[in-house]
Amino acid sequence: MDFIDLKAQQKRIKKQLDANIQKVLAHGQYIMGPEVAKLEEKLASYVGARHAIGCASGTDALMMALMALGVGPGDAVFTSTFTFFATAEVIVLLGATPVFVDIDAATFNIDPRKLDLAVTALKERDSSIYPIPACLRRDGAPDEPLTPKVILPVDLFGLPADYDEIFPIASKHGLWVVEDAAQSFGAEYKGKKTCVFGSVSCTSFFPAKPLGCYGDGGMCFTDDDNLAAIMRSLRVHGQGSDKYENVRIGINGRLDTLQAAILLAKFDIFPKEIELRRHVAARYTSLLASRDFPVAPHVPEGVKSAWAQYSVLAKDAAHRAALQKQLMDHGIPTAIYYPKPLHLQSALAGLGYRAGDFPVSEDISRRIFSLPMHPYLKPSVQARIIKIGTEPYLYP
Ligand SMILES: *Cc1c(COP(=O)(O)O)cnc(C)c1O
């Protein structure tokens, strides 16, 4: 059994895929060919954004968004500690400082109440209000205080963050919002598609994401004409009106024409696939409803997940290990997203966070695991997964 079955999808779109790829081979415009603009137009209209800017990965999308907002040394970017490493990595690459915030125990997304505390703690340099990086504490190194600049919420596992709670905090403190929608393309929050909640919103086309290509790819979305123009320039080495005129420092961040052609074929069936994902998730949830463990994911009112992952909670680390082994012994793969919150990663040790700073994320990281999830998972297979994954007599 595959954790994500990409072959079932490929079978359904093989003809269109082959035709689209052949078209690129025939016209030969491998860099910024017509498929890139066509995809940008389709996806912008799907999410309801004015501009879409295709780029080389979700990581580059985040990087370009922060660069366009002028994020750099001396700036603080508030984000979740329970996310993929790239979310914080780009902040550090730009010389800015990630300021972590714990998650809500039910949604696994940034906890707005704690976000407000984190911004206040940073402004006051007072870690008794909320944990902040060591260099920002009054008792820490005598660095210049940082400027709070951006809130970077993550729509984890496909579930949109709580934007109605986040926006008032952003305006109260004068912060930009950049949405990390790498996992949530196709999700909805109160009637709107994701990828429109940030001044810039970023998604990824990594193969395992809801809309994945056959390699790396990503996209930035914005309604702001000026930010769009800056990002279009950033993705081609900061080019000006001419290819050999450089007006800013940028990156080689383009989306390959071939990947755009593949995504165009995949996008044809994407809205249908999102529906199928919702059926798969609903079946898992109803199969789990009569049991105490593992705990099914919670979806708040008015929100529709894109179900990048179906992540459940075991009682504790030992229980999780037992459940995963039991499933593996029956050929059912599972995965842990994420075993270690970012504030405990050695690459970010310089921030000076400690174990215990973000107790919800630390607890969830010990108990969470994800079940096989893709649009073509059959009800009978799901029933078997839940049966094996909940057989009590094998528990420790
Ligand atoms: C996948 C992912 C990224 C990075 O996307 P890539 O396309 O792999 O560079 C960033 N943030 C989150 C939350 C992700 O899941």
Image (spheres, rainbow, N blue to C red):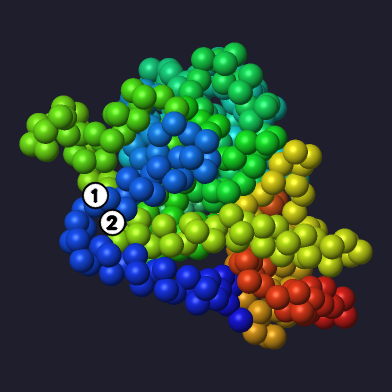
Q: Quadrant of the C terminus?
A: bottom right
Instruction: Check disc 2 and report the residue beneath it.
Output: 257
The reply, left or right, for residue 50 in relation to residue 288 is left
Using the image, tell me which numbered label, if any, was put on residue 32: 1
Q: Quadrant of the N terminus?
A: bottom right
Location of residue 267 with respect to 2 vertically, above or below: above
Query: Would residue 329 be visible to someone looking at this image?
Result: yes
- Please, what is the three-letter code of the amino acid marked with disc 1? Met
Q: Earlier in the sequence, mark 1 or mark 2?
A: 1
Q: Residue furthest left?
A: 244
Q: Quadrant of residue 131?
A: top right
Disc 1 secondary structure class: loop
The reply, left or right, for residue 231 in relation to residue 325 is left
- Nearest the eye: 313 or 170: 170
Q: Are marks 1 and 2 in contact (CB under 8 Å)?
A: yes
Q: Residue furthest bottom?
A: 330
Using the image, tell me which numbered label, if any, was put on residue 58: none
Location of residue 95 with respect to 89 vertically, above or below: above
Q: Residue furthest right?
A: 290
Q: Residue at x 11, y 38 (%)?
A: 243
Q: Residue at x 59, y 55 (%)?
A: 271
